Amino acid sequence: MTATSKSPSPPPRVGRPTAERAAAIETAILEAARSQFLAAGYEGASMDAIAASARVSKGTLYTRYPTKSALLHAVVRLQIEACTNTHVRSEPLPHDLKQRLQQLSRGILAALMAPESRPFHRLAHHAALGEGEFASALYELALRPAITDLKDEIAAGTRDFPLPLRNPEQVARMIQAMLYGWWLEREASGGATRAEANAYADHAIDVLFYGRTAW
């Protein structure tokens, strides 16, 4: 080799995908999983079919989502975030604490009742049957955003109260339980209108604020 000769360049290394490509892969996987779960149900959907539909390797899919339940969690979380942004956080909240909680409660019921939510309620319900830890995780996933919103508003709105609030999350869970329980009962008996849901949400917060005088 002469002094002026150069060694051949090494072949280019195949590195990690760019952030844009990684995001595109994630979107393709979640869209494919959503379609498969809604079409075939949790039990009927297969990771092989999801990978093929997303046009990714099974290795890529399993690296991101090691189990089918983890993939379902991601799909349900995405749907919950979309519904929350559309129905719960779409408008500015009033200044008054009671009115803020009433508006949030109306939004929570609207998100539960939204037509686009219904297939996911059924999917999550059937997926969770007979699987205690999985059912608990899905339940917490579905309710956590609403509980967090309510808790934050309660904590912020009671800072100047003469007596400090001992457990704002517990109060938020009580409100969520009132809303979720009413929705389940009405779903079992044929559903409810938005006007009925709004009236119930307002009444639930009145009971919280005024106790027996709101009966």
Image (cartoon, grey):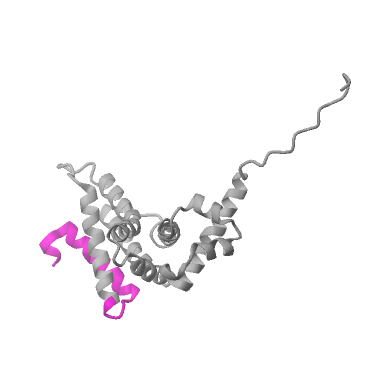
Q: Residue furthest bottom?
A: 190
Residue in the foreground of this view, choosing between 75 and 147: 75
Position of residue 4 measured from the top left corner of the image (x, y, whole percent): 88, 21
Left or right? Give the position of 24 relative to 39.
right
Position of residue 47 measured from the top left corner of the image (x, y, whole percent): 50, 62
Residue in the foreground of this view, choosing between 66 and 206: 66
Q: Is residue 21 above or below residue 5?
A: below
Magenta residues, start to end: 188-215
Left or right? Give the position of 22 relative to 117.
right
Q: Residue furthest left?
A: 212
Q: Magenta stretch: dominant SS?
A: helix
Position of residue 1 measured from the top left corner of the image (x, y, whole percent): 87, 23
Residue in the foreground of this view, choosing between 206 and 178: 178
Q: Which residue does the image show at 39% across and 69% down from the upper left? A: 123
Quadrant of the rendered structure where residue 42 is?
bottom left
Q: Which residue does the image show at 10% across and 63% down from the upper left? A: 212
Position of residue 86 measured from the top left corner of the image (x, y, whole percent): 44, 61
Q: Is residue 163 above or below residue 207?
A: above
Q: Which residue does the image show at 66% across and 42% down from the upper left? A: 14
Q: Is residue 130 above or below residue 6?
A: below
Left or right? Give the position of 26 relative to 149.
right
How many marks on residues? 0
Q: Which residue does the image show at 43% across and 56% down from the upper left? A: 67
Residue 206 part of the magenta segment: yes
